[in-house]
Image (spheres, rainbow, N blue to C red):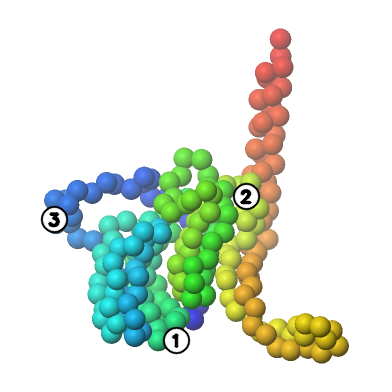
Amino acid sequence: MPLIRTMGESKKVESPPRLWRQADLANEEPQFVTLLVNRRSSPVQVEEYGRTMFFLQPGKECFIESWSPLTTYSRYSRIVFEQDGQVSAKENPKWEPPYEGWAIDLINGQDIPQSVRVTIPIGIVVFGIVNDFVSVPPGLARLIPLDIHDPLVKFKSVEWRLVKEKLPVVGFPNYMEERETMKKIMIPRPERDAEKIRKQVENEKLEAERIRAEWRKP
């Protein structure tokens, strides 16, 4: 699985994105084009935010077009569904992070979807959030904006990855065996970013105290 670069603070785009009519799309060039390749012997279900778009048949490939950086596939110029069940992906150099403020990169290095609970800043539109959980497709990554009070904000990325480790044999504690286990690898932000977050939280507390004090005045 190739490494996917991670992001810190990110830029802003208009949110929610422009609503396109079919007639508009016929006259507009897509912002991003992604090549999908299926090297497996069975069809691949291509989804967007949990909804099926189409099935890519064995040995086939196709292009999908995106008119917004908020789509799952706009981030990638090429996605290959490999024979061993893995997914390899190449990032599109034209894609830029579409959110302002603090964001976290959720990287799924596994061949099944992964999900995590997140708190989105008020007023920011993020597609595919269900009951505060965001899902990450197999082999891909999603950049998600975070509320400053979300515990995940102190991390710049989370990656689901298989890790080999020696664990006790069940029923035989004096013996060890090597097994693969799925781990969530949490990468903390640089200290300078962590300090910015602490100051921002502290400033919010001071402002809240100031407002409360104003309310108490006769």
Q: Give whichever of discs 1 and 3 has the lower sequence position.
A: 3
Where does label 2 land, which residue? 150
Point out residue 213 in the picture as x, y percentages from the top left corner. Answer: 71, 22
Q: How many marks?
A: 3
Q: Is residue 80 above or below residue 149?
A: below
* Element assignment for label 1: loop
Query: Could you tell me which residue is drawn at 47 percent across and 51 percent down?
Result: 129
Tell me where residue 163 appears, x and y as whole percent: 64, 80
Which residue is labeled 1 in the image?
A: 84
* Residue placed furthest toward the right: 174
Q: Report the front residue among 201 and 3.
A: 3
Q: Amino acid at mark 2?
A: Asp
The answer to whether residue 73 is left or right of residue 130 is left
On the picture, is 69 further left or further right than 21? right
For the question of whether residue 145 can be seen, the reply is yes
| Residue depicted at 53% across the width and 54% down the height | 133
Q: Amino acid at mark 3?
A: Asn
Between the C-alphas of marks 2 and 1, the distance is 36 Å
Structural distance between the alpha carbons of marks 1 and 3: 40 Å
Residue 102 can be seen, yes or no? no
Q: Residues within 10 Å of mark 1 (few under 14, many from 20)?
A: few
